[in-house]
Amino acid sequence: MGSEIMSKRCVYIILTETGSWINKFIKFYTGAPYNHVSISMDLHLNEMYSFGRKHLYVPVWGGFVQENVNQGMFKHFPETRCAILKLKVSEEEHCRISSLLQHFEQNKELYRYNLIGLFGIMLDLPLAMKNAYFCSQFVAELLKKSEVPLWDVKTSLVVPNDFLQHPDLQLVYEGKLHEYPLLMKESIV
């Protein structure tokens, strides 16, 4: 039993609500408290990954992004609310997730945002496209490909609120993102 405990690692799922106009529109439709999801390999959220906008003022031009709490959307919307969830994984699963994230990072120009898939969610139709994801589809697919499937549905039907409701995910923090106690703040020089 001791070796089983030692072999467990964690990944962190970050649900956010920025208050942007597109976020408010999605929230109006879904009624969910959070409408964006990212994944981080560490509790300090030094590196967060998702599919989202690549440019602050162009919400429809998106793809694979590495997010930073002190830059981009989160800097522009300092009142962003979040829920940080912990998922226990094995050492092997942790390595697979990390390896897949490296693959996405090294090949990010190949990936785009699955805008069509969002309409699929509204129609309850799994509309997956090659090399295209929306945020929750990406995190669900990343976990599935790492042999940590959380749902029996197509990943293109997974929405951010599904993570909040999943029994295997433990709430670590809920509140303003910039007030998260373990956040490593960038020093201002």
Image (cartoon, grey):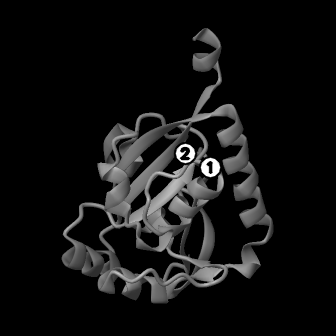
Task: Tell me the residue that label 1 is attached to.
Answer: 147
Would you place residue 169 above or below residue 152 in this image? above
Work out which residue is located at the far top of the displayed protein and give it.
Answer: 2
In the picture, measured across the screen, residue 12 lies left or right of residue 177, that is: right
- In this view of the protein, can residue 125 be seen by the observer? yes
Residues at circles 2 and 1 in contact by the CB criterion of under 8 Å: no
From what the image shows, is residue 67 above or below residue 114?
above
**Percent from the top left, x then y, of residue 4?**
61, 19
Residue 20: x and y, percent?
33, 75
Which numbered disc covers residue 45? 2
Instruction: Give the residue displayed 40% in from the left and 45% down from the top.
Output: 84
Q: Rate crowding at label 1 as few (under 14), some (14 to 19) or many (20 or more) other CA atoms within 10 Å.
A: some
Residue at 47% x, 34% y: name it.
Answer: 182
**Residue 142 placed where, x, y %?**
60, 59
Identified by mark 1, the residue type is Glu
User: In the figure, residue 125 lies in which quadrant?
Assistant: bottom left
Dot 2: few (<14), some (14–19), or many (≥20) neighbours within 10 Å? many
Query: Which is more foreground, mark 2 or mark 1?
Result: 1
Residue at position x 49%, y 68% from top? 155
Quarter of the picture containing the N terminus is top right
* Residue 126 image offset from top left, x and y in percent: 44, 80
Q: Amino acid at mark 2?
A: Leu
Give the Cα separation between the discs numbered 2 and 1.
Answer: 23 Å
Q: 5 or 72: nearer the eye? A: 5
Secondary structure of residue under mark 2: loop
- Say which element carries label 1: loop
Question: How many discs mark residues in the rendered view?
Answer: 2
Task: Answer with the quarter of the image where residue 81 lies.
Answer: bottom left
Q: Earlier in the sequence, mark 2 or mark 1?
A: 2
The answer to whether residue 40 is left or right of residue 100 is left
